[in-house]
Structures are given as structure tokens and as C-alpha cells.
Amino acid sequence: MGSDLLFSLNTTMPVFLVMVIGYMLGRARVLTKEFCKTADWVVFHLALPCMLFLDIAKIDLSKEFDVSYVLFCAGATVTAILTLWLLAAIFMKDKTIIGEFVQASYRSSAAILGTTYIINMYGDTGMAPLMIIGSVPLFNMFAVVILTFTAPKTGGVESTEASENRSKVFTDALIGIAKNPIIHGILLGMLYHLVPFDLPTIAEKTLSNLGNLTAPLALLSIGATFEGAAAIRRIRPTLLASFIKLFVLVGIFIPIAVWFGFRGAKLVALLIMLGSPTTATSYIMAKNMGHEGVVSSGSIAATTLLSSFSLTLWVFVLKSMELI
């Protein structure tokens, strides 16, 4: 148990500390609002699409491809997202934060932190590639859809235009989704598997360097723009989203996965998919698509800090039940 906790802390605490450094640099006015705005643009339009393209393009579909496992990951992802969106739309009073709340509740750092966690645990990526195929494209595509249709400027309660001309709003939203660079990165990564040649080394390393900017730039920007007063004002939805992210989804879908017969590395990959921290790029997407960003940044900070303990707890439970 102690070694698992230390391992979890070594995986998640560096991420949290980069946000803390960003916060300190922001208070010292080293990282200005103008810098953060530019950094957010670079991550959203360039670094993140490159990272997603490479993550999907590098997946070896010829090795240990398990259709039922991929379909389970996809089914759990879609079910969780649609259920959260429906419940938030019904019960959440402040409709302007529905998009951020839903995204923070389901969107895991599966491709970055999650893969690192699995490598440290098994020595290789295990079933992470199959989990990524079944979930990460859906994570991002649904995030674009939800954030588009719930943004205050299009689908929120403050939008007069939305109530007067719903068809135009719907059309504009679809155009926005089609133009989204995140979608482009995912689709290009999928299409790459149809190309009969490997990516040139120069191109791969260039894209990799750009993709590697995603996490540090996003985390520094989150920290630098973090607003304590606003975070306190949104503390309830932030804590609820964090609790759902770390405990509720795992508590619902892992028993179902066990019932389906998944064990070992497959179960660990599902645990990462469901219970790893909210990805830092959720803040970048929210900010770039017209949202406030407070619930996103607060949830990222909370889940990153607390996941060291929650993931350790889940691993301990699964080990004690001899499921992994």
C-alpha cells in the first residue's frame, strides 16, 4: 500500500506542482494574461492536435486487437457522457457551466498520465493503446460537441440569439465542430492507418516536439490564470465533478467490466480511463470555446492532487480481490 501511494504521488504530484509554479509566476506577473492567452491558442490549435494525431497514429492495430474490449471502452465512455449531460441539464441551476462540469466529470488524462501510470506498473503500455482507441477520440469529440452547444454565446441561458433563431445556432455549432482542430487531429490520426508508408522521421520528431508542448504550457497557463475567489464561488460543482471523476464512474463501470470478464492489464487500463485526473487540456478547450474556465481549472487541480490517493485505493481494492 505504501509503495503504491508513493508511486501514485510520483506520477501525479509533478503535474500539480507545475500548476503551482504557474500560479506563482502569474502572481509575480512573469506569466501575463497576454502570454497565457497566446499559450492557450498554441496548445489548442497546434500542440494538442499534433499530440492526438501521433497518439492515434502510433497505435499498432495488428497486435492483440480485442474488439469486445474496445467496444466496452467506447460504450462506457458514451454512456457516462450522455448520462452526465442529461443529469446536469436537468438538475444544474446554472446552465452556463454545464459544459465545463460535464467535461470535467468524464474527461480523463488517459493518454498522458494514464499511460505513464500503466508503464510504471507493468513495464509497458499494456492495454492502454486499445483503451485509447475506444475512449480518447470520443472524449475529445464529445467535449467539442458539449462545449459548443452549452457555450454562453450559443447554447447558454444568456443567449438571446439562440432563442430567436435556433436553426442558425445549430448550423453555426456544427460548423464550429467541423472547424475544430482537435477533431482534425483525431481524424488525421485515424486516416493515417490507411496510408501504406511510415511517417518520415523528421516529420514525426517535429510533430512530437510540438505535441510535447501540450502538458507544460497548459499546466502553466492553468496555474497563472487561476482565480481563488472565482474558484470558491464555483466550489460545489467543482468538488462534485471531481468526486464523479475519481470515484463514481469507477464505482459503476469497473464492476460491470469484471462481470464481462476483464482482468489484469485490461482492468487497469479501464481504471485509468475512468478514474485518472481530469486532463489539463479540458481547460484549454473550455477557454477557447467561450467558457469561463473556473470549473475546469479547479477540477484539474483537485483531481490531480487527490488522484494519488484515489487511484492507490482502487488499485489496492482490485489487488486484494485478485483481479489485477
Image: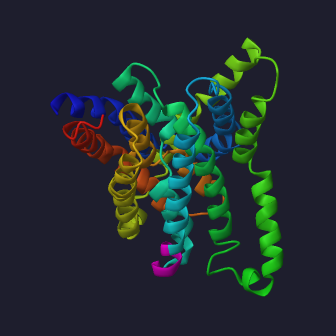
Relative to 110, is 286 above or below? Answer: below
* Residue 247 point in image, percent of width and height: 32, 55
Q: Quadrant of residue 124?
A: top left
Q: Which quarter of the rendered picture does the N terminus lie within?
A: top left
Q: Residue at x 61, y 52 (%)?
A: 285
Q: Residue at x 80, y 54 (%)?
A: 178
* Residue 298 point in image, percent of width and height: 41, 56
Q: Nearer the viewer, residue 231 or 8?
A: 8
Q: Nearer the viewer, residue 3 or 255?
A: 255
Q: Is residue 101 left or right of residue 201?
A: left
Q: Which residues are magenta?
A: 87-92
Q: Is residue 279 magenta?
A: no
Q: Is residue 261 left or right of residue 309?
A: right
For the stretch drawn in magenta, the main secondary structure is helix
Q: Residue at x 22, y 39 (%)?
A: 316
Q: Note whether residue 33 is visible.
A: no
* Residue 143 point in image, percent of width and height: 61, 56
Q: Note whether residue 26 is visible.
A: yes
* Residue 217 point in image, percent of width and height: 55, 36
Q: Residue reaching furthest left?
A: 2
Q: Residue at x 77, y 59 (%)?
A: 176
Question: What is the count of numbered marks?
Answer: 0
Q: Residue reaching furthest bottom?
A: 164
Q: Quadrant of residue 193?
A: top right
